[in-house]
Image (cartoon, rainbow, N blue to C red):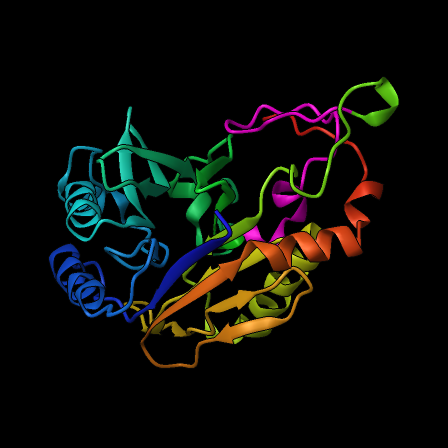
Amino acid sequence: MSTLTITIIQASLHWENITANLRHFEEKIDSIGERTEIVVLPEMFSTGFSMHPQSLAEKMDGPTVAWMKGTAARKRIILTGSLIIEEGGNYFNRLLWVLPSGEYGYYDKRHRFAYAGEDEHYTAGSKRLIASVKGWRINLLVCYDLRFPVWSRQQPAEAPSFFPGFASNVNPASGGTPISATSLEYDLIIYVANWPERRSHAWKTLLQARAIENQSYVVGVNRVGEDGNGIYYSGNSMIVDPLGEALWQGSKEEAVFTYTLEREKLTEIREKLPFWRDADRFSIEPK
């Protein structure tokens, strides 16, 4: 429970070519030499950030989900990344969290990137997904969500929430058990992304801001290369500690990088600098 090992796969994507992308990521995953527990792929890893869901969307029993389940089982890892899913006549930019057992959870991207027309093609999600691994709680989000700090904000004591996986805490003033540094809502945020190079400064700055304000580790996984619209992605995937310090940052090249997060460091920071005690209490109502 004291450590969590994560592998980032920062890769170029074959534009709207599911078969080629699955083959590409299978090779990347098979190249991982060290022991790892979670492998993180970019946003829309099987297609690139496409506004053509009518021709690219899959069902939850489709080939990409089956590939994720098979790969997670074969490698004994948790595998996560987002893809285009059709359900009930709606299209979702859906992040899947797939366990080796074949069980899974999912998060539908809440904030659609209207600047590129994502809001015209995809349905917004209304609930966060906070997963649990070895006692670590992980908040799973997608790309543009990074710009909206309320959506990722740690919930303080007695804050009501409609999010699945939320364990409510009790305000000490009410006479209940006080919230502690080890019982905050989550310990790590993972963002999967297709974040263009032209806004890479915002990407890096906001990843560090989310870590600082939530006193949480943050992992951001971005793609590299050029997509079918001529948009260039410079990677800059990052692992950030709860003080906002970059523990690792990718360059503009493909990379497979494994890092072990330390719970002891997280707890020490939260106890030494208990800023979370002064957080505002709030709730979010779905639209």
Please, what is the dominant secondary structure of the magenta stretch? loop
Q: Is residue 287 visible?
A: no
Please tell me which residue lies in front, 132 or 226.
132
Task: Tell me the residue at 80%/49% (across/down).
Answer: 274
Magenta stretch containing residue 223, yes or no? no
Q: Quadrant of residue 193?
A: bottom left
Single out the residue that lies furthest toward the right: 173
Residue 258 seen in this snapshot = yes
Query: Foreground residue, 67 or 4?
Result: 4
6, 191: nearer the viewer: 6
Residue 150 within the magenta-colored segment of the rendering: yes
Report the residue at 54% width, 50% height from top: 188
Position of residue 108 relative to residue 178, above or below, is below
Is 262 drawn above or below residue 120 in the view shown? Answer: below
| Residue 109 picture location, percent across and down | 45, 42
Residue 2 is left or right of residue 258, and the answer is right
Which residue is farthest bottom?
A: 252
- Please tell me whether residue 1 is drawn above or below residue 255 in the rendered image: above
Q: Quadrant of the C terminus?
A: top right
Q: What residue is drawn where x is 16% and y is 57%?
A: 22
Q: Residue at x 88, y 23 (%)?
A: 173
Q: Position of residue 12 (x, y in %)?
A: 28, 71
Q: How many marks?
A: 0
Query: Taking 74 as reference, is 259 above or below it?
Result: below
Q: Please report the bounds of the magenta region as a residue range.
A: 145-170
Toward the viewer: 257 or 129?
257
| Image-based side of 145 in relation to 121, left or right | right
Q: Position of residue 152 (x, y in %)?
A: 61, 44
Report whether 48 appears left or right of 260. left
The image shows residue 40 at horizontal and vertical percentages of: 35, 57
